[in-house]
Amino acid sequence: MRLKEYVLHHGRQFGTLFGLLLLSAILWALTPYFLTISNLLNVAEQTAIVAIIAVGMTFVIITAGIDLSVGSVLAFSGIVMASALQAGAPLVLGLGAGLGAGLVCGLVNGLLITGGHLPPFIATLGMMSVARGAALMFTEGRPVSGFSESFRSIATGEVLGIPFPVIVMVAVYIAAHVVLTRTKLGRYAYAIGGNEEATLLSGVNVKIYKSAVYGLCGMLSGLAAIILTARLNSAQPIAGIMYELDAIAATVIGGTSLMGGEGNVFGTLIGALIMGVLRNGLNLLGISSFAQQIVIGSVIIVAVLFDMALKRGKR
Amino acid sequence: MENHSVLEMLNIRKTFPGVVALDDVSFDLRKGEVHVLLGENGAGKSTLMKILSGAYQKTAGRILIEGREVEIKSPRHARQLRISTIYQELNLIPHLSAAENIFLGREPSSAMGFIDRGAIHQAAAGILKGLGVDLDPRIRVAQLGIAQQQMVEIAKAISLDAGILIMDEPTSALTEREIAELFTRMRTLRAAGVSIVYISHRLEELFEIGDRVTVLRDGKRVGTHNIQDISRPDLIRLMVNRDLTSQFPKVPAERGEEALRVEGLNRNGVLHDISFSLRRGEVLGISGLLGSGRTELARAIFGVDKIDSGRIYVKGELQEIDCPRDAINLGIGFLTEDRKTQGLVPLLSAKENICLPSVDRFSRYGFVSAGEETRAANRYVGQLRIKTASVDQRVLFLSGGTQQKVVLSKWLCCQAEVFIFDEPTRGIDVGSKAEIYHLMNELTASGVAIIMISSELPEILGMSDRILVMHRGRIVGEFSAEEATQESILRAALGQ
């Protein structure tokens, strides 16, 4: 009975999961290669970067905010880290610089929103341009390439055949789930998104927790930058363009409400996997990258339309 | 004319998955009458009216309008049938003018598709004048008070040529004087042949404005009566099926030492030189018209709004209160006047709402202990008899009275010693009201001090030990419970 209750309660995620399985089944029928272990690992590895960014996005959207700067922050963090490593910084320090750069960008977003009372859309739109410009200016538009074997193993390494990036992604999701469901930060994120005024009147320091959420989102962009840089063996100032849209799409397909106050990271993971599987499948089927954009955009719209119809049916 | 029914709802039944919301309910409305629909929360009043306004579809039953059977398919269809609804939460667009709101969606426009503003303003001015409302139709709705916004809603209904007007608790946010004005307008409408369904929790109002009353209980109709044929205690008995010994079961508590003292509090343009003190076991009522600074005073004490000067002493010690957290740490709890926008996070569970201000107590290293929270929440659910299937239920789905108890639990859980209640019984049913009053008695008996802000004079008179009256940000009168009367309070509140 417990299982039945759980399924009913989390019907939304099961719906998304069903969508993912259905999509996979169709692709398997069309191209049997899809369901090989090597391809699935490939999908997971490709999904990892956007999926990690989408975790931060989920936190932000739960507080009824939005972060448009994640892609630019990724590029900026990657450049900061790459430059530090090439200047001879030890590995740990370089990684710290990458995460730190993301964190700082996120905290600036948070400060502009909570202290400057800017709408999140505007604050992060500004950061999107500033971080991208900084990355380009610092490198004069050129990539920073060539890293040590130990750094590159962050992307190339594997445990029991599972690539490191996938392991990192899974770890991030488990940690994020624990934070959202078991900690004050998570509780307050839902409360702020659900009703900021009531949360403030309950004595919660809304400014600090909101800033922390944006800081976290920035730091996760930094983490994604590490993996992407290691994988390409190059930090590109034009990396991560349009990633904000993929992250938002994964979050929304995963059932997090743009109105805030609702959502969870497992839905987001499924959402990110749907996008990843779709891209992979379309590639396997030899569909042009132009047509792919149309398909992916349509899937996002249909998924959300479906979700809204489902929610209306509940009333 | 007297018995001519404009509307008959016959044997209406409405079920939601697992719940029978309405069971064989019949209701009729005569031309030019005010028919009051009365019942506790969850009795089915809103469901019945949502069926009439097209928001819900009935499961079974018939609806006749002017003797002809109709199926009301949508709110739009209801409007075509000349049925208009004025909801508790007004549905106006703040950035449009009063006139633009009145004609929203039906703007007279020129051949080019441009809106003819002149025509709109003129037509709106005509309607408002007909209602006897002195209001410039060009003014933006955001700049209007709630009472005036309601008049705009009524004007909108009239412009739609409404024959049936449903008013859902229109007075819950109005002051005495505004209510009197609203009733004058309603009488005008009634005289013009408009039939009004009036939903309210306030018994005193129904005797003033109602012609007939239908009482619902648990989704069933328990009776329809002419107002002059029924007494207040009878009505209460019909609604709750139990005798409430008294509407205001005040039990005076022993006064202890001083709990709170405010000296010379000022907030530019809002509060002027406010001083008072409050002792343990005491209920200090604060009366005044809407906008007199009552809520602003509460917000200033609770650290939501900054004060310009003045001192606040808690338990005899001078304190700096800069934010709600400071106030909470000093043992102050604040039940805001608007549960939905300020008191609760609707998407969170009852448990999470109850524990929101005191999460720190249930957490270690930032991790919240779900077990301890559940235990604490269950304690208050039992103590306050909160009607919920489990503490994990989202408060969104709870009734008004139950929600208010959740807010109360929130501050009980913080172990507050000074409670500020702002309109504690607004929009909640008679049964829950009585329970809230009993809780106030229990609180004062345990040495808690209470500030109770209320627009309902009977409540102020019935529950307070001492009464302060505010007018334009100042305290203009102080009365003991014995010497205060409705008249003396009202006179002070009006600044006379």
Image (cartoon, rainbow, N blue to C red):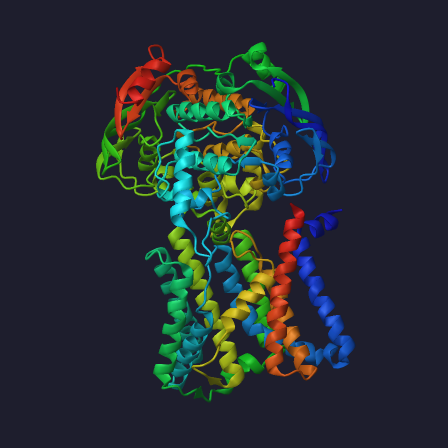
- Closer to the camera, B250 or B101? B101
Q: Is residue A167 left or right of residue A142?
A: right
B266 shown above or below A120: above
The residue closer to the viewer here, A106 or A148, is A106
Q: Please name the residue shown 50% across and 74% down the image.
A: A242
Q: Nearer the viewer, residue B242 or A265?
A: B242
The quadrant in which the C terminus of chain B is found is top left
Residue under the point 33% across and 10% down: B483
Residue A270 screen position, x and y as percent: 64, 65
Visible residue check, residue B417: no
Q: Position of residue A112 (x, y in %)?
A: 35, 60
Residue B293 percent coordinates (x, y): 31, 32
From the viewer's perspective, tell me whether residue A206 is left or right of residue B7.
Answer: left
Q: Is residue A9 left or right of residue A120?
A: right
Q: Is residue B197 left or right of residue B295?
A: right
Q: Residue at x 74, y 49 (%)?
A: A4
Residue B471 can be seen in this image? yes
Q: Please state which of residues A134 and A170 is positioned toward the viewer in this rendering.
A: A134
Above or below, comparing residue B384 to residue A59 in the picture: above
Q: Is residue A187 above or below residue B22?
A: below
Q: Is A115 situated above or below A279?
A: above
- Residue found at the far front of this picture: B111
Q: Where is residue B45 shown, x and y percent of the image?
A: 61, 29
User: In the picture, residue A303 is in which quadrant?
Assistant: bottom right
Instruction: Tell me what residue is drawn at x 76 percent, y 76 percent.
Output: A28
Q: Residue furthest bottom?
A: A146
